[in-house]
Amino acid sequence: MTAPQLYAHALRVIGQEVLKLRPVSLELQLVGDAYLVSGTFSVKFHDRPHRGTWNVLESWLKTSHKKPAKDESQPFLTSFSLRFTPGDIEQLDKLWAANRGKTDKTPDLKSLPELLRTVGEYIDSEGDDLVKLLKEDHTLVLYCRDEEGNLKAKECDLMALYKEQQVAISRRENMAIKDLWGERPL
């Protein structure tokens, strides 16, 4: 890790981009300095929110030889694979910065960008290096290497992540918070 908040920043930006696909499952790996993101998302042929995006999706599905379910009104899962370099992340962050605003509301931990950002802040605070992150439904498993090079696997529950989010917000705002749960490890 070369800078504080490296993972929190990168994972938030990746979450903002991947959220467009409405993923059902997600696997994120750090290989060198690139983040490799893959997973599945649900597609309904009659759910076409934006024709331009849909044209690209239809072409992609045809080339990947994915067949829709017999009943085209039923969704089916298809896979995706994306790669984000540090340059991609900085460029995307500049694009997303215009959409982010100052608000008094606590970001929604159930949103993918905030969830990934909170996980990134946890990794940053531990001084670990991200190896892999797996998310499916309400389960999130994190694989990191500590400073000695030991691989650590940690299943994160929403309550522990909520506590980490509050601590991170407090750090960002330089405000103290009341710990309602007592000392509860992530």
Image (cartoon, rainbow, N blue to C red):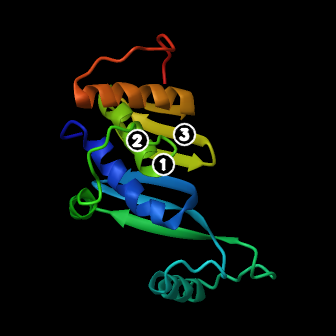
Residue 43: image location, x then y, percent = 63, 73
- Identify residue for label 1: 111
Q: Residue 141 carries which label?
A: 3
The spot of residue 162 in percent (x, y) is 48, 30
> Residue 48 placed where, x, y %?
57, 80
Q: Which residue is drawn at 52% across and 82% down?
A: 57
Among the two numbered marks 3 and 1 on one chain, the one whose residue lies closer to the N terminus: 1
User: Disc 2 designates what residue?
Assistant: 107
Q: Earlier in the sequence, mark 3 or mark 2?
A: 2
Q: Do the residues labelled 1 and 2 touch (CB within 8 Å)?
A: yes
| In the rendered image, the vertical position of residue 146 relative to residue 102, given as above or below | above
Residue 131 in sight in this render: yes
Q: What residue type is labelled 1?
A: Ser
- From the viewer's side, name the closer residue of 32 and 100: 100
Viewed as shown, does residue 3 lie left or right of 56?
Answer: left
Q: Residue at x 62, y 43 (%)?
A: 138
Question: Which residue occupies the extreme right position in the image?
Answer: 70
Residue 130 spot, x, y in % from top left = 38, 41
Q: Residue at x 76, y 79 (%)?
A: 69
